[in-house]
């Protein structure tokens, strides 16, 4: 941390700031310019609050020189984190394609969809059993029944299951059925939930909060990582901006940035990011071109009758066409799409 | 709901849309213009998903004509909701002033602060025992020990306690100690938590999500209200914008808007909204002038040593000066600040 | 400026950075910590580009320690800038109230409105002759004819004229008629226009760009000030955020911040900030309570037939009621509303 | 337009609204539901202001059913607009690649860069002679001298010139030298300038305002088109959001949306969108994958000494590598990159 004293700071104020820093167990390095004094904080002491220093008389600004996340940073872990999922190396050379309906609506729907997305090239099956809905009057998901249907769909197709968990108390239940726990955008800073999935040691797909910064996303990952669960996938799913034509604004910049500063895999969710099925293919290709490690997509057999998110769901044939293009694009950026292992029958 | 058909919609497409609407139990009203047909949805049927209709062939747009919240709306409940708190009528003519530290740090601190803010004119005491922190490495609060100190401070001063609850499992515990449950900005759409506080029947201070719209805030309130808990106070605490000079942007517009479209009391949290103590007084007066039902403010005996949020905390003497100005301003806008009842000794 | 070297920077990289800084005419101050080296840039040399330094090998970050505006800052000019306008001291103790229609629509309208707002307590008359409209098909203003009507209205009421100028070539023409040149929100970074009004030496009301930061607003003011025109009033008029219920979000925080870091007067435009007349009074009172030096308000005799912005225009009687409340509130925050000098007849 | 009356609207209010609509030359279609009345506005009358109708007693909301741009819409002009540029069909199958420095710094620099980018595969040369700079103290460009150097560079390489014009009075001068007039992000709503370039009949590259919506971008294009200049290219260059890690947020969603609703070519400017050279390649590939008609990129021989935007400028060898990848990606999305015609020597 660097403490920039104001041009009018007195000698007394400067020595008080130095005293405070030293009392926390740090050394200081003093830079006395003609205009102002700058104090560098050196070494490792007790946690030093930037805001507290900023309040001391004579201080103009306090500038951090390191980022607040540790385990999530590439400095801590220079190599890419690779998470095996259904025979592919997620975060490695393979591109992952997770597909399925927004909500599990009934047994037939999820099993039929699982077969369809598997056929089209999906790596894993998504589907919500517990649904976060803006309205208390909207369909809230089938709950444990939905989890059971997902497990049946896995049985039938071999596709691993990605499904959301919304509260700490349900983490053990969801872990019984799911291969990957999804943390939704509204829960990215639900610290009790991050704690619980951290303890679970289950792979986690962590969606970026709809108005969270890149740094906050990494800090949320840090909550999970700091509980010893290293299998965290980040997911860019669109951020909230002033633009209302699309549901959200897909922050494609975040993909190369996250790959650069973190070692964790970075997935992309174009369905929520753009919110209208007709633009999902373009945004999906953009995500892959930008370096994403895979896609998570909403696919529905009959979007016009979907319980939720029909507006942004692809039909299986459109999804298959998209997977085809992703396959063609992959080698240009040094990636590949592996066909899933055949179902064990 | 109004369904706007595109100019190129065929007769078949129009009749299909009508059939779909009727199949859900609604009547329709048809407006056939020269350019396009518009279909009004009439009556009450099963929940009709806007997105599903938008997907039907020939549909250009679907426009809702009513808002999605019901119990939270002033149409449902034309009179202001008034919540009694320590002898004042919150949401009525009285202005409420809730003050105290960001975190309960130790027994002495919270009791000393409670006396100080009471002296200066506070209506209630705030203080966090469970703290949501961006970093897993930062101080996370004293937990139940903090709740006990808060109860002691209430004992000593008569001030009711406002404190945050962060997870559903802890709602019963926090209810044992707190007079008002605070839902923090990161948890505004933590539906499991909203459900739990709704069931608790305890008064709730619901903070607006830092990037939630006014409508989403009312939908979050609706979650609590729909569980039969009518004692909900909304709280504007600043929204996230492109401006970085201040911590957040206080959305002062939201105050008259919320008072207009909802009957629930609207509190203001200028401390988090601006993030620097030197601007808290100006923003507090602005909130009151705009029609807020009260303030929730961070006050600390020694901000330079605060465990959290020192940068935005007022010292008791600044807080007292602010209360004085609020008292002067109140009659101009038809409000009053009542001095709290004397401590029972 | 402070250059933070990365933890892996080599001795050679450090000495190259130092060489580059010195070659621009600066001294340096070196702080060699155990983890990293930090280089302070001292003295005054040729303009040093932050981005250029950031590109040098081994550099992690470059942190400015001073703000980029000079003449606009309170450090440069500690006392409030006061601009006389129709007998009041704008930026001093007096609150200014500028009112009138969005557009000058015809001779009768503007003269009638001028009398009405003067009667209700306005300090100056606003009205647009050249109108920036989002649509090329919308009413674009009466042009010079409108300016002539404004001059007649001044003649009739004694109220000085505030009106917008949209292009450099028209600055001389508008100066002939206007007392204050308004720069609209879309032109805040129209540098050719800022240059021209800077040269004009006419008082300027500079509206904040709808997505400009506080710093960018001060930099735009700096363009005008640096041409020797010191009579610049800043104007907060709402910023663009994700919230769509209101037209813009009034950034009330910006008022105390601008008053703190700059010496220039700060006006508030609640009409554009909230966009619906029913909320204009609340936001106006909030602006005054927060420390604004005055208001600029849209007032129309018949909003339902206004050529533009009728939705946010007050009728004269509502405007009069608002002025009355501002008068009552002024003394609480150490201000006053002076009644305008009687018309010279 | 559809006028939604409130549930409490009286018969008198309804008939007044109908009278007002008819007085403007429209027919109406009445839909009288059990709860509320809805009035459809039919036919073509005088311009009808949405805000005016919204102010009439009893009106709850006024909903437009058509978009405000006409000539810019694909309904008006179903086929893609194709603009020939240096032998390629911009907006057709060919991808355009415009490259060069942010600023023309001197004669040697621009000619050397022109050769380098041509060698690497550029279609056109960009370079600023008139520079919009946030600070009045920063380098403002070489002015006409810069234009002359650009013309020399065209002479030497055959590359057409894309350069910015900042004020109406300079349009004739810039037209003498430039092949394409660039309107910068700060001037997207500088209507006098849009008017002037509309009159010029020169091809225009119109950058999206940094906080302009997709609709506002199309309305700005409409200003130019409505003056009879049909050669307008739109350009997505990043929007302003809460994220500060990157300079802007590249709105990749906007690319397929603009291609869908408008016939105009859509270019992408990844350099400004992300602001750091190390991420420019990823964002460029994303833009092409999403369907952009080409790229405009900042390339500098020596970014560490660039007068402006060095932080985001590619060196020629990185640029060449990027062009190579674009060439590989083009066929997957049905596009091609044509090598420029050989220089006539």
Image: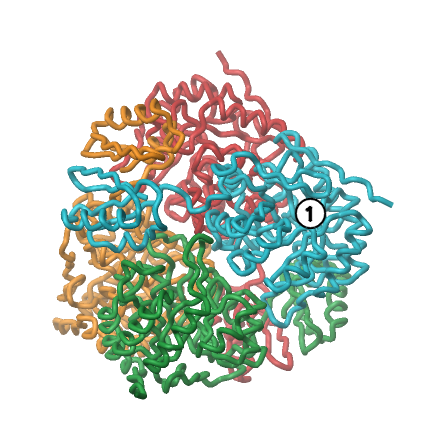
Chain colours: A orange, B red, C cyan, D green
Q: In which quarter of the image is residue A285?
A: bottom left
State the image coordinates of residue B30 (x, y, percent, origin top left): 62, 75
Going by the image, does B30 lie left or right of A291?
A: right
Number of labels in the image equals 1
- Residue C18, image x, y percentages: 23, 47
For residue B245, side relative to residue C9 (left or right):
right
Q: Using the image as rendered, state which of residue C238 and residue A202 is in the foreground.
A: C238
- At 65% across and 54% down in the image, what residue appears? C312
| Chain letter behind tag 1 | C
- Position of B34 compared to D92: left or right? right
x and y percent of residue A193 in the render?
29, 46
Relative image position of residue B188 (x, y in whole percent): 42, 46
Element class at badge 1: strand
Where the N terminus of chain C falls, by quadrant?
Answer: top left
Q: Is residue D104 visible?
A: yes
Image quadrant in which you'd find residue A205: bottom left
Quadrant occupied by the C terminus of chain C:
top right
Q: Would you call the spot at circle 1 few (<14 residues within 10 Å), some (14-19), or many (20 or more)?
A: many
Q: Is residue D311 above or below residue D101?
A: above
* Residue B235 visible in this rendered orientation of the protein: no
Query: Residue A33 vs residue D43: left or right?
Result: left
- Above or below, comparing residue B265 to residue C172 in the picture: above
User: Residue shown at 50%/47% (left/top)?
Assistant: C218
Give the residue pinned by disc 1.
C98
Q: Which residue lies furthest to the top in this view?
A: B345
At x 45%, y 42%, the residue is B207
Closest to the observer, C94 or C231:
C231
């Amino acid at each position: 941390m660097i403490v920039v004293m104001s041009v009018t700071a007195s000698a007394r104020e400067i020595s008080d700031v130095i005293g405070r820093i030293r009392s926390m167990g740090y050394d200081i390095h003093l830079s006395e310019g003609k205009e102002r004094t700058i104090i560098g904080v050196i070494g490792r002491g007790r946690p030093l609050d930037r805001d507290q220093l900023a309040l001391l008389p004579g201080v103009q600004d306090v500038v951090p020189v390191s980022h607040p996340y540790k385990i999530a940073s590439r400095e801590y872990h220079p190599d890419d984190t690779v998470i095996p999922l259904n025979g592919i190396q997620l975060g490695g050379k393979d591109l992952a394609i997770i597909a399925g309906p927004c909500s599990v609506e009934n047994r037939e729907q999820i099993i039929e969809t699982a077969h369809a997305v598997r056929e089209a090239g999906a790596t894993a099956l998504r589907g919500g059993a517990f649904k976060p809905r803006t309205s208390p009057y909207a369909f809230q998901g089938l709950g444990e029944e939905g989890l059971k249907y997902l497990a049946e769909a896995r049985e039938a197709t071999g596709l691993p299951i990605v499904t959301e968990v919304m509260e700490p108390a349900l983490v053990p239940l969801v872990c019984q059925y799911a291969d990957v726990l999804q943390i939704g955008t509204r829960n990215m800073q639900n610290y009790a939930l991050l704690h619980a999935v951290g303890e679970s040691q289950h792979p986690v797909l962590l969606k970026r909060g709809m108005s969270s910064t890149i740094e906050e996303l990494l800090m949320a990952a840090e909550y999970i990582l700091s509980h010893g669960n290293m299998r965290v996938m980040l997911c860019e799913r669109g951020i909230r901006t002033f633009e209302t034509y699309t549901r959200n604004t897909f922050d494609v910049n975040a993909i190369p940035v996250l790959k650069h500063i973190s070692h964790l895999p970075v997935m992309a969710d174009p369905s929520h990011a753009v919110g209208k099925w007709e633009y999902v293919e373009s945004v999906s290709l953009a995500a892959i071109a930008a370096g994403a490690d895979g896609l998570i997509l909403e696919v529905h057999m009959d979007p016009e009758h979907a319980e939720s998110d029909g507006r942004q769901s692809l039909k299986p044939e459109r999804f298959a066409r998209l997977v085809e293009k992703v396959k063609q694009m992959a080698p240009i950026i040094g990636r590949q799409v592996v066909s899933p292992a055949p179902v064990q029958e």
